[in-house]
Image (cartoon, grey):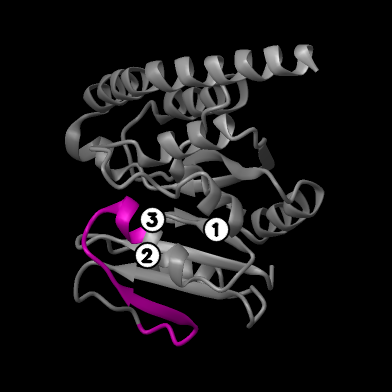
Amino acid sequence: MKNISIIIPLGPDEDQLSQLLHDLDGLPPETEIIIVSCGDVKVDEPRARWISSPQGRAIQQNVGAKAAKGEFLWFLHADSRITPHGINALAASLQKAPQALHYFHLKFLNDGPWGMWLNEWGAWFRSQILGMPFGDQGFCLRKDNFNKVGCFPEQAPYGEDHLLVWHVRQAGLKLRCTGETLQTSARKYHQFGHAHLMVKYQWLWLRQAAPELSKLLRLRFKNLVKSNGE
């Protein structure tokens, strides 16, 4: 974990960062923690580097990645919660597959509406069966691989994490689950409505996935033809 830079984008209305920083207290002192803020909010955390950035999760994460000194980049949302078991699982997963993009199983905190287990099951199916984890599952990958696939696409109106995974797969890199759980807040489902957000998110990611899947299949077919020709 000494070679990891943790990058946390902080939005103007996020107020759960201190809990995540508490979860990270057990990390070695050498572990770099970078908080990329788009506002004036600042938590008293002497271990963290504070960087200012224009607002936008993709932009903020790219700014943090560029400033990071670690060999690996671990992107965490400010409302995430991680346990010591999760941290140890990530370290073991990185050791076994250092070239992969690593992620966690997703579990929602008890701050949302009833029925969030449906979303948890959907996240499991999407990531484990379809190979499509999202950013709230705690992406971690080598910095050189992150740069190789083009970082988070800043021009995308949404789904920068979803697109990053497609670009990782199109580059021939593997995905690997740590086997442990990362928790995240479900408050937005209370605020905007559970059913409404579920339908909206499914439609948006399926719409975004179609051209990326086509590109992936074309690349695989091209590589297959090339390998057969050799």
Residue 78 seen in render: no
Work out whether residue 195 or residue 13 is closer to the camera in this orientation and state it.
Answer: 13
Classify mark 1: residues with Cα within 10 Å, few (<14), some (14-19) or many (20+).
Answer: many
Name above or below for residue 16 compared with residue 34: above
Where does residue 144 sit, x and y in percent of width and height?
A: 60, 56
Residue carrying label 3? 79
Classify mark 2: residues with Cα within 10 Å, few (<14), some (14-19) or many (20+).
Answer: some
Mark in the foreground, 1 or 2: 2
Residue carrying label 1? 74
- What kind of residue is marked 2? Val
- What kind of residue is marked 3? Asp
Q: What's the residue at 41%, 66% (across, down)? A: 64
Q: What's the residue at 31%, 26% (across, down)? A: 201
Q: Is 152 a magenta residue? A: no
Q: Calculate the distance from the C-alpha at mark 1 to the C-alpha at mark 2.
A: 13 Å
Residue carrying label 2? 63
